[in-house]
Amino acid sequence: MRVRRNLDEADPPAREPVTVQWPPPFAPPSSGPWPQMRVPRQAAPARRLHTTMLAVDICAFGDHRHDDPVQCLLRRQMYEHLRRACEFAVLPWRRCHHEDRGDGVLIVAPADLPVERLFEPLAHHLATALWRYNRNAADSTRLRMRLAVHSGLVAPDPYGVSGRALIELFRLLDARAFKNVVARSRRPLGVILSERFYADARTCGGLADADAYHAIRVRTKEARIPAQVRTDLGTFD
């Protein structure tokens, strides 16, 4: 049965349409530990630079023995030893671009520095410092690291750096074959060099014992990357 509506009832007020802005405007925090960043409306084409990149990560960082305080300690020790090794090799830390990766760090050297000549002093000093630190550290706080080195073109932008060479660098660092070599060695530092960087360093005399490296081929989703690996850097007395 149809019910007639009471004419005395007033019509409900019409709802105003709600306009939602999407995507939301970028609003960096006004305060806090994070630096504010200006994001350009239209980014200009990035100028690419040919330079050397180093990527480091801490072995077994997610191990069950590494709770939050231990992880903070390992990160602090990683940065301390890296800074000292860079300064020892005359690779100024303040002139490098570095990005934190949680369990590691990306370091992009200035394009005008011959890292091919500075790499082995840096790696030897770092490996020796890690061995001396581990000698007096508890099992859960011992620090072992993997180091990958590559050279190529990178494009800086307001967010950091990008480029195919960076992708290849982290493919080397995360390669299963490299991780297996480092795990079997039990040494504090394992190093993997891209074939390009290895050839440049060998040509300029930057490798004291180039034959101490052995070749591996890293399989990635995109290609196979030839590389050179070494785990016996450093002085252990």
Image (cartoon, rainbow, N blue to C red):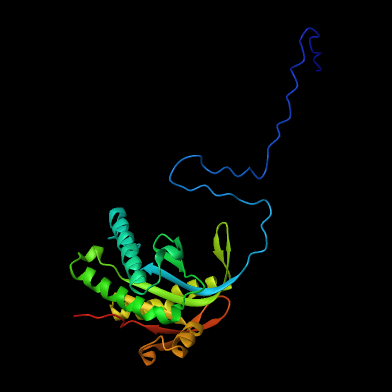
| Residue 6 shows in this picture | yes
User: Disc count in the image?
Assistant: 0
At 38% from the left and 73% from the top, the residue drawn is 90
Q: Which quarter of the figure is the N terminus placed in?
A: top right
As drawn, the residue found furthest toward the bottom would be 211
| Residue 60 shows in this picture | no
Q: Where is residue 49 in the image (x, y as percent from the top left)?
A: 58, 71
As drawn, the residue found furthest toward the top would be 8
Q: Position of residue 165 (x, y in %)?
A: 55, 74
- Quadrant in which residue 144 is drawn: bottom left
At 43% from the left and 76% from the top, the residue drawn is 176
53 vs 1, left or right, is left
Q: Where is residue 88 in the image (x, y as percent from the top left)?
A: 33, 72
At 66% from the left and 45% from the top, the residue drawn is 23
- Quadrant in which residue 141 is drawn: bottom left
- Quadrant in which residue 153 is drawn: bottom right
Q: Which quarter of the figure is the C terminus placed in?
A: bottom left
Q: Where is residue 13 in the image (x, y as percent from the top left)?
A: 74, 18
Q: Nearer the viewer, residue 217 or 9?
A: 217
At 46% from the left and 47% from the top, the residue drawn is 34
144 vs 23, left or right, is left
